[in-house]
Structures are given as C-alpha cells and as structure tokens.
Image (spheres, grey):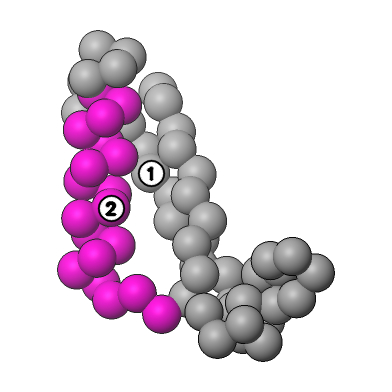
Amino acid sequence: MPIAQLYIMEGRGAEEKRKLIERVTDAICEALDARRDAVRVIVQEVAKDHWGIGGRTAKELGR
C-alpha cells in the first residue's frame, strides 16, 4: 500500500486539499500501477511560523 505524506503551509481551503489528494493519488496509481483504493495520502498543515525559508519564518516573509 503506497503512502504519500505531504507537508503544506496552513491556509489552503478544503477544495484545494481535495484536489491535491486526488492528483497525488492519480500520479501514484500511474507511476506504480497501484490500485486506487490501496493509495493513502496524508496532508499535514504546518503553521507559517513553524515553516522556515532562508533562516526566517514564512510568516515573517509574508508567505
């Protein structure tokens, strides 16, 4: 059973996350010839002040 674990910054809506899960599932099915019902996708949202870019937080950078 393939499992994809994705980390994204907080702030995206439910529909965007749904599309992400769908498209990642599609890519795994195509690349690995996996059954769709065997694919698991875990999306973890990270607070912007917990996401570092170039030594600063994403929040500081206005991301």
| Image quarter of residue 25 | top left
Give the mark nearer the N terminus: 1 vs 2: 2
Q: Secondary structure at mark 1?
A: strand
From what the image shows, is residue 4 above or below residue 18?
Answer: above
Q: Residue at point 47% right, 76% down?
A: 10
Q: Please provide the residue range marked out in magenta.
A: 11-29
Residue 20 bears which disc, if any?
2
Q: Which residue is mark 1?
A: 41
Dominant secondary structure of the residues highlighted in magenta in the image? helix
Give amino acid for label 2: Leu
Q: Is-magenta flag for residue 16?
A: yes
Give amino acid for label 1: Val
Q: Residue at point 30% right, 40% down?
A: 24
Please provide percent x and percent y for residue 30: 22, 20
Q: Residues within 10 Å of mark 2 (few under 14, many from 20)?
A: some
Q: Is residue 52 left or right of residue 1?
A: right
60 or 37, nearer to the observer: 60
Label 1 with label 2: CB-CB less than 8 Å: yes
